[in-house]
Image (spheres, rainbow, N blue to C red):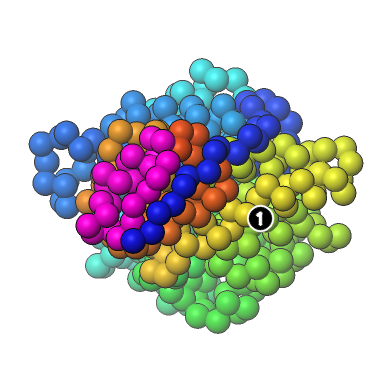
C-alpha cells in the first residue's frame, strides 16, 4: 500500500480573455453528464448543460478558445447530433455575450447510418450540420466522417466530397484529420492506409480549396507527420496540432514554422496551457520559449497516460480530472464510460496531475480520489 502526499497547487500566471497570445489555442471541452436523470445510462443521454457551460466559461476566462462538440465531448461515443445541437447553440450564444470569446463547432455526418451511405448522402449530411452552425453565426470545424470512409471508392471521392461541402461554407473552416488510434472506423482516411499517400491527397484538396480553409488539425500522435505537412501547407493555411503526445515542441515550432493548438489535453491542463502560452508571447522569444517549455513539458507524462491505447477512451481520464478538480460534483459520463479505464490507470492519472500541481484544492482532490477508488480496490492510501 502506497502513501502519497499531494503537492500544493502550482502558482501559474495565466492568461485571460482578450489577452493577446502568440498562438491560437482551442480546447476541446468535455460535457458534464446529469447523473440524476432517470434514464438507462448505457443507452440514453442526459447532459447537465449548466455545468457544461460553466466549464466553457472557465476555459474562456483562461484565454483559451473552445472547440465545441468534438471528440473530447464524446461525439460519436455518447454525444449524438440532437444533443450536440443544443450544446453548440448554448456555447455559440454564450460566446456572443462574452466579447472576444472564441468557439468553433464540430460539423460531421454522425446523424446518418453507415449502412447504405453514398457520397451524395455524405455531402447532404455534412451540409445539414454545416447549415445549422452557420445559421447560429458560428465557426466550423469540419470533422472526419465515418460515413465517407464507408462510401468512398478512392482518394478522388474524398476530394470531391470536401470540394462540394466547402463550397457551402460562409467562413473559412478548420479541417480535422483524426487518426484511427482515436477512431478505428476512420482507418484509411483520404483513400490510403499509408500516411504519406493520404497526406498527399489531403494537401492536394487543401490547395484546391485554400480560400475556404482556415487551417487543419491533425491527430496522428506522431510529430514527424505534422511537421512534414505543416511545411507543405499553402500560404495562409494554419496547422493546428492535435498531437496529445508531442504538443510542446509542435507549438513552440522551429525556424520553419509552428503549430497552433486544438487539443483535448487542454481540457485537463487548462491553467498550465494558459500560462505556457502567455509565456510564449514574451517579447524576448528565447526567454519566452524557455518558460513555455518549462511549464508545458511536465504535462506530457500526464497526457501520454490519458491518451494511451486504446486512445479513444482518453475521455474517462479527462472527466475524472475535472471531477477531482472540482469542476463537477460527480464522476459519471455519457454512456457510462466512467468505467472504460481501470482504477490503476486513474491512479496514475491522479499522481501525474498532482506532480505538476494541477489540483487547485489538493485536499478535495485527495478526498475524492479516496472515495472513488478506495484503498481496498485501488491499493492506494492518499495523505493530503
Q: Nearer the viewer, residue 116 or 107?
A: 107
Instruction: Judge left or right: residue 332 versus residue 145.
Output: left
162 relative to 51, above or below: below
Check residue 377 for magenta coloring.
Answer: yes
Instruction: Tell me what residue is drawn at x 43 percent, y 74 percent.
Output: 187
Q: Please indicate, yes or no, whether residue 171 appears anywhere in the rendered image.
A: no
Which residue is tagged 1? 297
Image quadrant where one finds the N terminus? bottom left
Give the dominant element type of the magenta stretch: helix, strand or loop.
Answer: helix
Q: Please indicate, yes or no, whether residue 274 appears anywhere in the rendered image.
A: yes
Q: Nearer the viewer, residue 109 or 58?
A: 58
Give x and y (percent) for residue 123: 41, 56
Q: Nearer the viewer, residue 35 or 184?
A: 35
Give x and y (percent) for residue 383: 40, 45
Instruction: Tell me what residue is drawn at x 45 percent, y 66 percent.
Output: 308
Give x and y (percent) for residue 141: 52, 47
Q: Secondary structure at mark 1?
A: helix
Image quadrant where one finds the C terminus? top left
Q: How many marks?
A: 1
* Magenta stretch, residue numbers: 363-384
Q: Residue furthest bottom?
A: 194
Instruction: Tell me what residue is drawn at x 69 percent, y 43 percent.
Output: 276
Q: Which image quarter: residue 129? A: top left
Dot 1 alpha-carbon crowd within 10 angstroms: few under 14, some 14 to 19, many 20 or more: some
Q: Residue furthest top?
A: 97
Instruction: Tell me what residue is drawn at x 53 percent, y 43 percent.
Output: 7
Check residue 341 for magenta coloring.
Answer: no
Give x and y (percent) for residue 105: 47, 41
61 relative to 274, above or below: above
366 relative to 51, above or below: below
Amino acid at each position: 500500500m502506497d502513501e502519497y502526499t499531494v503537492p500544493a497547487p502550482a502558482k501559474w500566471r495565466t492568461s485571460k480573455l482578450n489577452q493577446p497570445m502568440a498562438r491560437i489555442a482551442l480546447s476541446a471541452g468535455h460535457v458534464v453528464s446529469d447523473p440524476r436523470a432517470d434514464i438507462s445510462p448505457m443507452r440514453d443521454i442526459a447532459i447537465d448543460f449548466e455545468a457544461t457551460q460553466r466549464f466553457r466559461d472557465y476555459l474562456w476566462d483562461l484565454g483559451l478558445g473552445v472547440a465545441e462538440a468534438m471528440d473530447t465531448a464524446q461525439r460519436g461515443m455518447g454525444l449524438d447530433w440532437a444533443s450536440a445541437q443544443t450544446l453548440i447553440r448554448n456555447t455559440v450564444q454564450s460566446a456572443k455575450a462574452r466579447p472576444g470569446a472564441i468557439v468553433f463547432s464540430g460539423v460531421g455526418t454522425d446523424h446518418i447510418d453507415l449502412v447504405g451511405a453514398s457520397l451524395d448522402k455524405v455531402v447532404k449530411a455534412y451540409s445539414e450540420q454545416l447549415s445549422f452552425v452557420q445559421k447560429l453565426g458560428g465557426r466550423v470545424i469540419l470533422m472526419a466522417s465515418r460515413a465517407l470512409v464507408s462510401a468512398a471508392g478512392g482518394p478522388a471521392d474524398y476530394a470531391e466530397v470536401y470540394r462540394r461541402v466547402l463550397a457551402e461554407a460562409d467562413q473559412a473552416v478548420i479541417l480535422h484529420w483524426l487518426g484511427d488510434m482515436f477512431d478505428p472506423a476512420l482507418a484509411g482516411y483520404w483513400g490510403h492506409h499509408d500516411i504519406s499517400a493520404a497526406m498527399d491527397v489531403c494537401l492536394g484538396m487543401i490547395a484546391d480549396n485554400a480560400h475556404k480553409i482556415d487551417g487543419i488539425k491533425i491527430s496522428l500522435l506522431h510529430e514527424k507527420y505534422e511537421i512534414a505537412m505543416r511545411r507543405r501547407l499553402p500560404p495562409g493555411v494554419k496547422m493546428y496540432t492535435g498531437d496529445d503526445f508531442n504538443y510542446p515542441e509542435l507549438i513552440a515550432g522551429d525556424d520553419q514554422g509552428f503549430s497552433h493548438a486544438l487539443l483535448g489535453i487542454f481540457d485537463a491542463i487548462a491553467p498550465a496551457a494558459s500560462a505556457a502560452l502567455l509565456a510564449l508571447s514574451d517579447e524576448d522569444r528565447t526567454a519566452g520559449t524557455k518558460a513555455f517549455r518549462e511549464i508545458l513539458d511536465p504535462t506530457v507524462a500526464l497526457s501520454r497516460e490519458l491518451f494511451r491505447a486504446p486512445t479513444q477512451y482518453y475521455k474517462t481520464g479527462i472527466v475524472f480530472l475535472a471531477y477531482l478538480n472540482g469542476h463537477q460534483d460527480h464522476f459519471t459520463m455519457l454512456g457510462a464510460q466512467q468505467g472504460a479505464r481501470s482504477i490503476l490507470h486513474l491512479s496514475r492519472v491522479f499522481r501525474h496531475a498532482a506532480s505538476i500541481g494541477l489540483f487547485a484544492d489538493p485536499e478535495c482532490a485527495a478526498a475524492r480520489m479516496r472515495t472513488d477508488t478506495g484503498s481496498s480496490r485501488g491499493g492506494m492510501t492518499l495523505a493530503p
